[in-house]
Image (cartoon, rainbow, N blue to C red):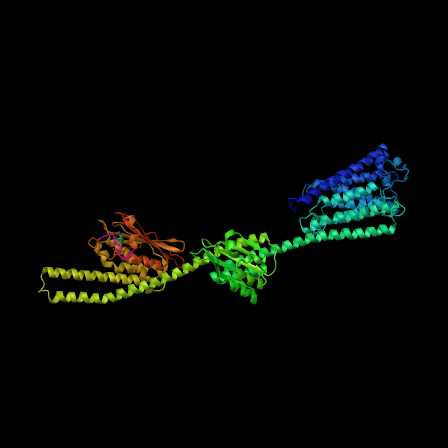
Amino acid sequence: MSVSLPMNQPRRWASTVAKAASVAMTLMGGLVLIGWALGIVALVELFPALTAMNPITALLFILLGVGLSQIAWKKPSAAEGKDAARWVLGSIVALMGVLRLVDYAGLLHLHIDQLLFASRVNALETYPQNEIAPNSAVGFVLCGLALSFSDFETRRRFRPAQVSVLVAGVIALFALVGYTYRVLYFYRFGGALPMSLDSAVEFALFCIGFLAARPDRGLMGVITSGTTGGAVARRLLPMAICIPWILGAVLLYGEHSGYYRQELALAIFAALSIVIFAGLIWWNAQLLYLVDMERERADRRMAVQHRATRVLADASGLVEGVEQVLRAICETLGWQVGVLWLRHPGEERLRWAGAWSAPGALVEEFVESGRELSFGRGEAFPGQVWERDRPVWVTQAAWLGEPRRGESAARAGLRSAIGFPVRAGELPGIMEFFATAEETPDPALLEILGGIGSQAGLFIERARAEEQLRRATANLERSNADLQQFAYVASHDLIEPLRMVTSYLQLVTERYDGALDDQGREFIHFAVDGAQRMRALIHDLLDYSRVEVRGASLEAIESEEAFGAALSNLKIAIEESGAEVSHKALPRVCGDNAQLTRVFQNLIGNGLKFRGAERPRIEAGASRSDAHWVFFVRDNGIGIDPKEFERIFVIFQRLHTRREYPGTGMGLAICKRIVERHGGRMWVESTPGKGSTFFFSLRATNEPAPEAPQHPRTSIG
Ligand code: ADP
């Protein structure tokens, strides 16, 4: 399959040359035929006393010209019919060539060159017996075959047709050079008729046109390509053909005219050839040199970009990452020192933030000389880069601007420096690199370094944020642990004295009941009630603080079982309230059985407690959502104002007085904490007066979910 790509400039030109060659060939052949038909000698002989072109030769050139136009105007993939026409044209030309050669070999005497205008052909003065010259016959065989098999290509993209046409071209070149230098042997084989000058021109045209018609294929692919090889070939080939030819001809003409002798002509030819070709070679070598240099630089740029990006992506810590990126840039560029300056929070100065240097005492001394320094905007090299806010490349000694650093740079032999901004959010920095070699500034490299500066900035910002986050998390974990410890110890230690207060108050009631009046008894009742409430509060607080510390490990459990346990704990309350509790099948989840029981118990308990006028109806179930099961516990109680959805999960937060509904305000806080410990979430939906639905999610186990039956499984009440 052939793919046609957009043509570059040389290929467009080549295509025009091919078309022009085909037109010129056909025209020339046509004119010669007209010349024979009308007897116009000037048309059949280019110069008087030279061989005239045989009319059959002219006809064959017309066929070749038409065949060439078919290639020049047609893309390789076009219709088959035209290919057949070209094949026929090529075969006729090649066959005629072969027949003429057979004639020369004396095997047959067909006299094909006498087929047209025989009387006129044989009446010319110069060569009475006008025939197709043997070299022309060979040329026709070669060109005819080339035309027939023009688009045939071997698997290695070799085109035999191009070689065939090149051989014909060389025969034509010999003839043309022979005519220029008047060397008969170059265009005449043995005693046969010489190739006419216009035949030589026609063959040359066909050769050029044929090669140019497929400018992107075979041998021509290299010459017309956009590569350096193509550029060099296009520069050298015309020179290699024209210079010796013209130079030789001019010198020969001078010699013939008697201006100088043969030795001198040859000496001038040799000397001028040396000078011209040496110059040409230098010119082209310079092109190759520049291309190679540019490629080397491009490789270096790519390598810097690639290594720096990789290092920045892999590095974890700020210090380690900075050192690695400085090192990566130094090593890929072959530079000796890299330094990072960063602005510190609350300061308008750049301070030393890290460095990397190649081994060497003087270079290390230079790095050390900067360690204690700081620079304001515009001060010394880092300050200048900061002020200009773009990459800077300097190659003179005076660039450091800070005397001590400048001196140690000179001692270390550092001669080139690059600086570029590192954009790390609010607090930017500067990266500096130094080399002992005097490096030529490379704007494209500077641009890439500018990009690396932005990447490094993002990295520094990220590393700083990560460090802050790490610190904050550690602080938070510590204060959380302290708080937990405090709550645990406090609740634990408070229980004991409280128990004493309650016991002694009870003792007072029992022993001194008679000595107390009604008010005294009431006071003691209040005191006991308060102490009991405090006990409940402390118990709940203790439970809350134990959720994390005392929780069992999370494993696959049947939530159905936890639900059953909660129901049996609430059996009396359910019976007393006459509630109807139902649930759908509950799944297996990853959790702590006791804690899940606690969650169900609190939610069902609240459903019973915050009942409305109707008989309480509580319903539970679960549905799958990705990797989680979302549980719900719905009641038909008093409901909750949406404004309070968040508050009810906070410890000690209640929406009612104890007189209305007893409780500590800890139940939901404990549930939420348990669910969060399981990696889940808890929330509520409710319409005041109509009931509430509490939701919580728990991680599913990897085992398949049980089939949920359509009817309620449990019904108590
Ligand atoms: P407590 O039940 O001890 O008051 P909770 O933490 O369990 O504490 O509940 C906090 C508050 O949220 C309750 O005081 C109540 O106002 C409200 N609440 C909880 N569950 C329900 C419910 N099912 N229906 C209506 N309000 C509720």
Residue 167 makes an appearance in the image: no
Residue 297 makes an appearance in the image: yes
Residue shown at 50% from the left, 52% from the top = 387
Residue shown at 10% from the left, 66% from the top = 512
* Image height of 190 relative to 362, above or below: above
The main secondary structure of the magenta stretch is loop
Residue 651 on the magenta segment: yes
Q: Could you say which is closer to the camera, residue 438 or residue 100? A: 438
Q: Position of residue 140 (x, y in %)?
A: 80, 44
Q: Position of residue 129 (x, y in %)?
A: 90, 40
Left or right placement of residue 240 versus residue 320 in this view: right
Q: Position of residue 155 (x, y in %)?
A: 69, 52
Left or right placement of residue 272 versus residue 532 in this view: right
Q: Quadrant location of residue 415?
A: bottom right
Left or right placement of residue 111 versus residue 543 in this view: right
Q: Residue furthest top?
A: 38
Q: How many marks?
A: 0
Q: Quadrant of ligand 1?
A: bottom left
Residue 134 on the magenta segment: no
Q: Could you say which is closer to the camera, residue 421 or residue 553? A: 421
Residue shown at 19% from the left, 62% from the top = 531
Q: Position of residue 160 (x, y in %)?
A: 74, 49
Quadrant holding the C terminus:
bottom left
Residue shown at 80% from the left, 40% from the top = 60
Query: Bounds of the magenta span?
Result: 650-656
Q: Could you say which is closer to the camera, residue 390 or residue 138? A: 390
